[in-house]
Structure formats: C-alpha cells, structure tokens
Image (cartoon, rainbow, N blue to C red):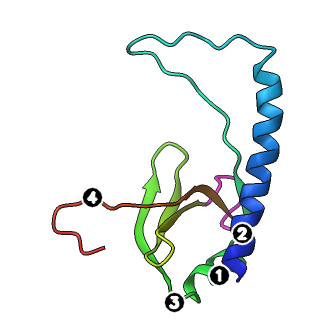
Amino acid sequence: MFRRLIQYLVLSIVFILIGTMASVAQTKETPIIGPGQAAQTTKPVVCMESSTLLKSFTEDPEEFLLIKYRDPVMETFGMIWYNKVDESIYVLEFPPTSDGTLLCIVVLGNDVRIEMPGSKL
C-alpha cells in the first residue's frame, strides 16, 4: 500500500512538472544536438527519508532487490528494485549531500521486460 502511495505521488509530481515544462518549452527554442554532442535535461525526482523508503521495499514480498551499484560521478550508491507481479522497477539513489538520510526515486518503470540471456525473470 505504501508503494502505491509512492507511485501516485511520483505520477502526480510528474504530471504537474510536465505541464509546467511544456509551457516553458513553448517559449524557448529546443537546442539542436548533432552527432557526438550531448544535452543535459531536468527530470523530476522524489526523495524521502531513506529508512522509511527502504522499509517499504524490504517488507513488500513482491519486491526484490535486483541490482546494487555505485555511481562514480556523484560518488553515491543506488539500487534497482523489481516487482515481477506489477512488472515494474524502481531505481533508487542516495543524493550526494544527504549522508544517507535521504533516498530518491530517480526512475519508475512499468511494463518491464528483462532481456538477458538465460534470465528467468
């Protein structure tokens, strides 16, 4: 149930920000990106107290930790949780300035298909 609340919160924020960004985007020209060039974008991120957020995943029998990783750019840690029933993933990262007190949902993915040779997921 707590996970559903997080999903609704994330989706609500995304819809609000999309509306705001759409109105801003209409007033600015989109930069032209050529081959070999990169552009930085802004993506909505939801952060919560880390122990509360982790508890919502660890106590849910449908969620399991798929991957842990270290972010070499921000020098923090992250993890990917997978829900086989909902076919969804959450990518969680500790922000660099929180000293582990905050944890952020940086990706919420639905209709997940894991395409790895030999995978039974």
- Mark 2 and 4 residues: CB-CB less than 8 Å, in contact? no
Tell me if 89 is positioned left or right of 3 in this view.
left
* Residue with the mark numbered 2: 6
Which mark is in front, 2 or 1? 2
Q: Are marks 3 and 2 in contact (CB under 8 Å)?
A: no
Q: CA distance from mark 4 to mark 3?
A: 23 Å
Q: How many angstroms separate mark 4 from mark 1 (CA)? A: 27 Å
| Residue at the spot of label 3 | 61
Distance from Cα at disc 2 to Cα at disc 1: 9 Å
Specify which label sits upstream in the sequence, 2 or 1.
2
**Which residue was labeled with disc 1?**
56
Residue located beneath label 4 in the image? 115
Tag 3: residue type? Pro
Image quadrant where residue 22 sits: top right
User: Mark 4: which amino acid?
Assistant: Glu
- Asked if disc 4 and disc 1 are in contact, CB closer than 8 Å, the reply is no
Classified by dominant secondary structure, the portion drawn in magenta counts as loop
Q: Residues within 10 Å of mark 4 (few under 14, many from 20)?
A: few
In the rendered structure, the answer to whether residue 11 lies left or right of residue 91 reads right
Q: Residue 104 appears at what percent x and percent y?
A: 66, 60
Rendered residue at 72%/80% (across/down): 2
Q: Earlier in the sequence, mark 3 or mark 2?
A: 2
Q: Earlier in the sequence, mark 2 or mark 4?
A: 2
Which portion, as a residue range, is magenta? 94-103
**Is residue 51 located in the magenta-colored stretch of the structure?**
no
The answer to whether mark 3 and mark 1 are in CB contact below 8 A is no
Q: Residue furthest left?
A: 118
Q: Position of residue 82 (x, y in %)?
A: 46, 71
* 99 in the magenta segment: yes
Q: Which badge, 4 or 1, is on the more N-terminal residue? A: 1
Vertical relation: 92 (above or below) 23: below
